[in-house]
Amino acid sequence: MRQITNLKFNEQGLIPAIVQDADTGEVLMLAYMNEAALRRTLSSKEAWFYSRSRQELWHKGETSGNIIKVLSVWKDCDSDTILIRGEPTGPVCHTGNKTCFFQKITRQDIEASHPEEV
């Protein structure tokens, strides 16, 4: 098997992968990929990731049925982060929300937790 070159995986062999809705530009989620997850994603055109807690590959939507159809995969300027542009077939977040990024942090949140640092 040929090695994937020009990508900087971390010491655990992982690279962050940001998933973006190709139609709206909305950031849907962040997960991690190892080389096997990236290969499966590129070959299947569906998002695969590596679960750091379970230490195994997982196919996005394997339990919910809400897969992400991958349209393109990009790397950033430092080659240490991946951007997946795709089409979700339903809510992406395990909470049932469209995106995992639905909780806004405000100045009041920061002041309440650490008022001396604001």
Image (cartoon, grey):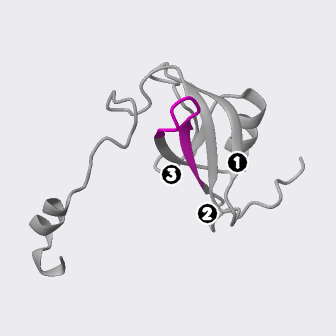
Q: Nearer the viewer, residue 32 or 63?
A: 32
Cα distance, mark 1 to mark 2?
Answer: 21 Å
Please tell me whether residue 63 is drawn above or below residue 77 in the rendered image.
above
- Could you say which disc has been placed on residue 52 in the image? 3
Q: Earlier in the sequence, mark 1 or mark 2?
A: 2
Please tell me whether residue 67 is drawn above or below residue 77 in the rendered image.
above
Residue 102 position by quadrant: top left
Q: Tag 2, which secondary structure?
A: loop
What residue is shown at x 62% (from left), y 37% (from top)?
A: 85
Q: Extreme right residue here? A: 2
What residue is shown at x 59% (from left), y 41% (from top)?
A: 49
* Residue hosting label 1: 74
Q: Earlier in the sequence, mark 1 or mark 3?
A: 3
Q: Is residue 39 magenta?
A: no
The amino acid sitting under disc 1 is Trp
Please tell me whether residue 40 is drawn above or below residue 6 in the rendered image.
above
